[in-house]
Image: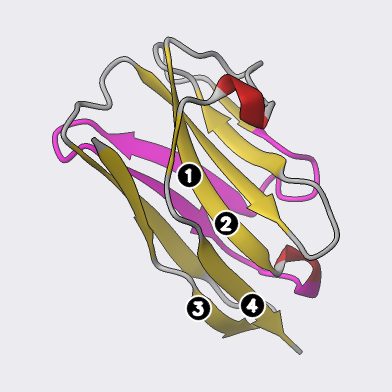
Amino acid sequence: VQLVATGGGTVQAGGSLRLSCIASGFSLDDYAIGWFRQAPGKEREAVSVLSAHGGNTYYESSVYGRFTITKDTTKDTASLQMSALKLEDTAIYYCAVARGGSTWWRSPRQYELWGQGTQVTVSS
């Protein structure tokens, strides 16, 4: 049972990246998906959450309108499409899952399984 995050890299400001989170050994059907990021010297913060049921979403204010979270249960894959990237988006990005979670689940402590993290670097 694991999550594998892919898709990080280096991109110029204004560019786009798509992060993917692949579930192995279990189905994402009943799980909320959280994408978190952690920049050096800062706490891990929730960037976006997709509820386990109902398709409700949450976006942190600084990424609202630029990032889109999705889940494909047929492939047990979650994604975070990031556009119009800014220097301040530079961080390690993590995906995580929480069984039955809602968009109010924004604390890392509420998530039970984590991907390994993928570095996103936005350059000027």
Asked whether the residues under the numbered discs 3 and 4 touch, taking CB atoms below 8 Å apart as contact, a structural biologist would say yes
Numbered disc 4: secondary structure: strand
Reading the chain from its start, which is encountered first: label 3 or label 1? Answer: 3
| Local secondary structure at mark 1 | strand
Q: Name the residue that disc number 4 marks.
A: 121
Residue under the point 80% across and 49% down = 62
Where in the figure is residue 61, as x and y percent of width and height? 79, 41
Q: Is residue 106 magenta?
A: no
Q: Nearer the viewer, residue 78 or 15?
A: 78
Q: Amino acid at mark 3?
A: Gly
Q: Which mark is residue 95?
A: 1
Residue 29, given in percent of the width and then of the height, sits at 26, 20
Left or right? Give the position of 58 relative to 41: left
Considering every residue shown, the one lying at the far right of the view is: 41
Secondary structure of the residue carrying tag 3 is: strand
- Looking at the rendering, the stretch of residues picked out in magenta corresponds to 59-87
Query: Helix, strand, or loop for circle 2?
Result: strand
- Residue 89 position (above or below residue 112): below
Read off the residue under disc 2. Answer: 93
